[in-house]
Image: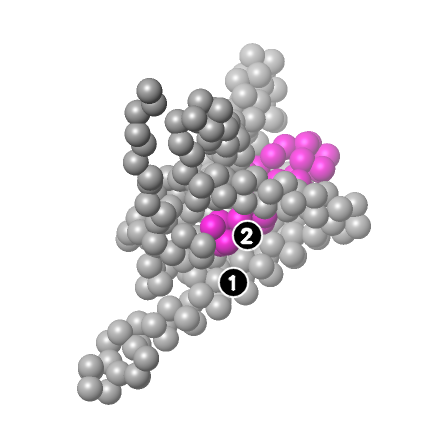
Amino acid sequence: MNASHEVEPRPEYFYQTALAASALAGVAGYVNALTVAGALHIGTTHMTGVTTRLSVDLVQARQDHLVLDLSLLIAFVLGAAVSGGVLDSTRLRLGRRYGVLLMMESAVLSLSLLLPGDPIVLRLAPLALAAGLQNAMATQYSRAIVRTTHMSGVLTDIGIAIGKAVARRGVTGWRLFLYLGLFFGFATGGLFGALAYTKMGHHALVVPVAITGVGGLIYFVARLRWLRRATLPSDVAPSR
């Protein structure tokens, strides 16, 4: 006899979170496709491959690649550190500083467009920093159930859900919906990124720069309006 399984409650603001996370995964997939399609074929939104490259380059004594590998790793951690310093909560709330982080991500991505391409680290390190910032933001507001810059964990979660379904041990529908949205968001972003690279090269970065910048500005304005309403005396607060 199968043991009963409690239904895991759906998180607050789930659909807003899922939509935002899928969009961010799309941005990450787009940026990663640009760098993989480039001359060095290096993904800058996930550090597993970069860490492996570092190990190989250490053995092969490829000093030029070592500098690049270390720069990408440090930049990713720095971006995550900035995100951790700016956000003050692990719960999704309108008053949090997500807009600030998105505008910061847009500015960092812009650096990759403005800096020269030689040495290549000047273009790739800002992309890794932006990826670390974004992934840390998503991880914090989702309590570590959302990953937007790499798909290993997402595919693992999808596999776990499939295994539970086959074993009839119960599947949390909202989790599977979220994971599939992340995967297809990343994959779709990668498709458009690859297509854009064939037409525009590195200048195709203007798309994620615009998306994160405009999205961050919209949220920032909404946050200011929300904070203003929250501080109004109850007798003059706008009626609902």
Circle 1: residue type: Gly
Q: Is residue 16 left or right of residue 181?
A: left
State the mark number for residue 128.
none
Judging by the rendered image, the residue that carries numbered circle 2 is 23
Q: Quadrant of the C terminus?
A: bottom left
> What residue sits right under mark 1 in the picture?
215
Point 43% across, 61% down: residue: 99
Local crowd at mark 2 within 10 Å, few (<14), some, or many (≥20)?
Answer: many
Please name the residue shown 41% across and 52% down the image. Answer: 14
* Secondary structure of residue under mark 1: helix
Q: Residue furthest top?
A: 59
Q: Is residue 173 above or below residue 214?
A: above
Circle 1: is it few (<14), some (14-19), or many (20+) Cα within 10 Å?
some
Where is residue 191, by image quadrant?
top right
| Mark 2 element type | helix
Q: Is 137 or 17 nearer to us in this picture? A: 17
Marks 1/2: CA–CA distance: 10 Å
Residue 114 within the segment the image draws in magenta: no
Residue at 50% in and 28% down: 162
On the question of residue 205 being in view, the answer is: yes
Is disc 1 in contact with disc 2, using a CB cutoff of under 8 Å?
Answer: yes
Q: Amino acid at mark 2?
A: Ala
Q: Which secondary structure dominates the residues rendered in magenta? A: helix
Residue 17: x and y, percent?
43, 53
Q: Position of residue 24 (x, y in %)?
A: 53, 50
Q: Which residues are magenta?
A: 18-47
Magenta residue check for 26:
yes
